[in-house]
Amino acid sequence: MSIIISGEFYRNQSSEGRAGRLIVDGDDVRVDITDVNFQTINMRRDFLRSEMRIEPKLSTLVRKIYLPDGLQFQTHESAAVDSLDNRARWKLIAKLEKTGWHLVPFAILTPILAVSFYRMMIPLIIGLGLFLTPAGVPARIDTATLGSLDKIWMRPSRTQDYRQDELRVIFDDLVQQRHKARDHRVPDYTLEFRRMRPAMPNAFALPGGTVVLTDTLIKDFDDDDVLAAILAHEIAHVEYEHSLRQIYRAIGMAALINMIAGDAGPMLEDLLLEGSALLSLSFSRKHESQADKYAVEMMHNIGRPPEKMALFFEAIQNGDMKLTKPRNPLPIYDDQGDQSLDAEFDPDPAPDASPEVDLRGKNWFSSHPLNQERIDDIRRWSAELRGEAVPEQGAE
């Protein structure tokens, strides 16, 4: 019994098809194309079934059969082609594609591979990135980030010059006490003062050694020991290269997302050129613990009470230190920073000013997570340096 399949013939990978039929009778195959003289085009019309090759069935795609003399036959009559191709494995694969069960192994393997990548490859990316980073790159990141922030969020400080000089003396004392000297990428430490909106206490360090204090932090926490502790903490982040590590971790995560879900966007460009992206990278608990311990040691070395850092954290945690919002919030300014960021607001609000805003969990602590264990650790390290009895956890 002959099997007749209708479709289109294509010769020598041409995109021009001709309608016709493929007639299979036992081991014999005949090509029937309307208005074609096979002798003229020097192509066989009859051949053996063993000379044709049937492409495996894939879901609902067009079926293809490859014939001698560079001839290809395409048809939508999949059932008829199945009667010629009895390979059960292709039918099973096509069925799985149609039902979606073929995705089950990938659904199982994908999270396993993602976790393995996160556990093994991201630390490797971080280490390799730190090793290959040229000496001048962190300083360029500082320049680009500070320039971006100066356009959008920050303006020149209004802290008086004598106060800036006092804080720079403290900063220089701390820099002289740093003990994690490196042979490569030695930071070029500088202390910068800025106004930032929203006007809340903030301090941050950039990878190349630039440390920024905001006017509000200086005004609201007017205690040299507290400010010294914050500066020491930020210097520690630079010494341990925490910002660079977070950048490379973000790049590794972008690669992981790209591997699983597709394009993750220009992550590296955003991190290097957009200050907000860099500052949004929260430090891990390990990084914070390293920076706290480093700061406690430096505070002790310059003769300042390191437990002031714990007192500062407790005040923030308990809501004892608060900041009043300006009565007239500033409008959004454009990317050139030409709007009213320079507008004055009354630093001592009138009685009808907005209610106080609790600072817990905001600004500095958005990238420097706070918890009681951290406060207890600072007290314990401080006591150990002075040779005193270690206070109980959570003690007042």
Image: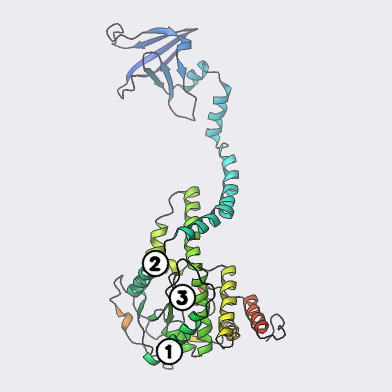
Q: Position of residue 290 (x, y in %)?
A: 58, 72
In the picture, the quarter occupied by the C terminus is bottom right
Tell which tag, 3 or 2, sits nearer the viewer: 2
Which of 181/107 is in front? 181
Instruction: Name which of mark 1 and mark 3 comes first in the sequence.
Output: 3
Q: Position of residue 114 (x, y in %)?
A: 56, 50
Q: Which residue is mark 1?
A: 353
Q: Which residue is mark 3?
A: 204
Which of 395/57 is in front? 395
Q: How many marks?
A: 3
User: Which SS class for mark 2?
Assistant: helix
Q: Quadrant of residue 215?
A: bottom left
Q: How far is disc 1 from disc 3 in space, using C-alphas?
A: 29 Å
Q: Which residue is mark 2?
A: 141
Q: Which mark is residue 166?
A: none
Callout 3 crowding tier (Cα within 10 Å): few <14, some 14–19, many ≥20: many
